[in-house]
Amino acid sequence: ENLVKGSASMIARDAFGFDLLDNVFTVVYDVDAGRSTAFVSRRETAEEARALVSDLHSFFAQYGGRSVETGIGIEGARMIEIMGTFEVMFSFGEYFAGVHEAPDRKHAEKIALLLAGSLKKTTGKKAD
């Protein structure tokens, strides 16, 4: 639902300019007249996925990102505003997932919740 046809892709390395992030699958969603990219990367361990949440958040903060509180109910989720867009990152077992370049906070949160719900349905796990 709301998936932009033909938008699925895979980033083999340096996803979003971050050298620790590789093998990332992305899709673009068009929700409420705005587009953003949802992403998922399966890591070797849940610990690695959790560490990437903090690492990517710190990476964006290093380049001027501003932490934003989020009340979306995904445990451990982090949000940052950078260059007029919003990023959300969270872990879900061995999956590192989130939203890239959402046009506003509400949009980022909505896509993150849809993504977490999809991961829950697919894996039978809950967010970390």
Image (tube, rainbow, N blue to C red):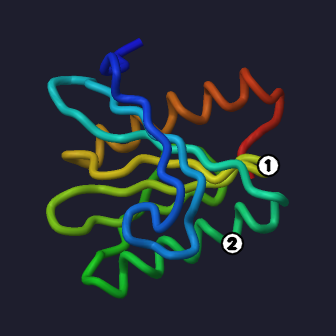
Taking the image as shown, residue 20 lies to the left or right of residue 69, namely right
Callout 2: SS: helix
Distance from disc 1 to disc 2, alpha carbons, whole Å, reads 12 Å
Residue named by callout 1: 93
Quarter holding residue 59: bottom left
Q: Residue at x 18, y 32 (%)?
A: 34
Residue named by callout 2: 51
Q: Residue at x 44, y 37 (%)?
A: 9
Looking at the image, which residue sits at the far front? 12
Taking the image as shown, residue 26 lies to the left or right of residue 105, namely right
Q: Residue at x 58, y 44 (%)?
A: 40
Callout 1: SS: loop
Q: Are marks 1 and 2 in contact (CB under 8 Å)?
A: no
Packing grade of label 1 (10 A; few <14, some 14-19, many >=20) is many
Vertical position of residue 36 compared to residue 21: above or below? above
- Counting residues from the start of the chain, the first of labels 1 and 2 encountered is 2
Q: Label 1 is placed on what type of residue?
A: Gly
Q: Residue at x 53, y 42 (%)?
A: 25
Packing grade of label 2 (10 A; few <14, some 14-19, many >=20) is few
List x then y, in percent, for residue 102: 27, 46
List x then y, in percent, for residue 52: 62, 68
Q: In which quadrant is the N terminus drawn?
A: top left
Vertical position of residue 9 compared to residue 43: above or below? above
Q: Label 2 is placed on what type of residue?
A: Ala
List x then y, in percent, for residue 47: 81, 66
